[in-house]
Image: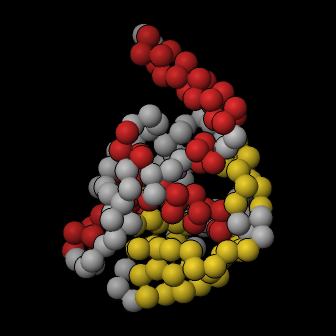
Amino acid sequence: MLLNILKYPDPFLKRQTVRVSAIDDGIKALVGDMIETMYHAKGIGLAATQVGVDKRIAVLDVPDDEDRRERGKNLVVLINGEIVHSEGTIVYEEGCLSVPGITADVTRAAHLRVRALNLEGKEVEFDAEGLFAIAIQHELDHLDGMLFIDRLSRLKREMIKRKLKKALAAEDRAL
Ligand code: NI
């Protein structure tokens, strides 16, 4: 089932999520819906907060080559995901399904060690780098109620918020 993706400035996007205590049929169905919604929106990651659910769940499918996507190849489900170690810095022009039409350079850690539960409830630990590491940090931020624009300098953030407000106002007047 396709889920509705919340857009800035929906206050739910600031919600802090809670850990998943048991991976039951409801959680499995939600994850399935999130994956379907991510692909439908042509995203490479989606966090539960973005679909109005305050649980620590994110799905990702980061392509090896951004110009040649192979759906499902790198599909990852992160339940209760956390970064146990990070190193280095990387700058990338990020966008977000909840902040349509806006991109901006964000500085993130370049290398990560990540721990999470998979859909079988098994604890997994793995390394991530490049765009995969960036996407994980972006999604985990969502689960802490933070958008990528909150990572920008105040000046840049205010500029983007003004632009978004103007676009929203124009939408309200659209015929
Ligand atoms: Ni996002």
Q: Is residue 128 above or below residue 40?
A: below
In the image, residue 5 sits, relative to residue 121, either above or below, namely above
- In the rendered image, which quarter is residue 122 located in? bottom left
For the view shown, which residue lies furthest in the left direction? 25
In the rendered image, which quarter contains the C terminus? top left
Identify which residue, 32 or 146, lies in the foreground. 146
Return the x and y of residue 89 as percentages of the image width and height.
77, 64
Q: Quadrant of residue 101?
A: top right
Residue 167: horizontal and vertical position, in percent? 54, 21
| Between 13 and 41, the one nearer to me in the picture | 13
On screen, residue 145 versus residue 22, left or right, reads right
User: In what quadrant of the picture does the N terminus appear?
Assistant: bottom left
Q: Is residue 114 visible?
A: yes
- Seen at 21% across and 74% down, the residue is 25
The percent coordinates of residue 130 (x first, y second) are 73, 68
Left or right: where does residue 92 sit relative to residue 113? right
Can residue 5 be seen here? no
> Which residue shows up at 59% across the image and 63% down it?
137
Q: Residue at x 44, y 38 (%)?
A: 7
**Left or right: where 43 falls relative to 172:** right
- Residue at figure coordinates x 70%, y 34% from the top left: 156
Measured as percent of width and height from the top left, residue 22 is found at: 25, 79
Q: Nearer the viewer, residue 101 or 57?
A: 57
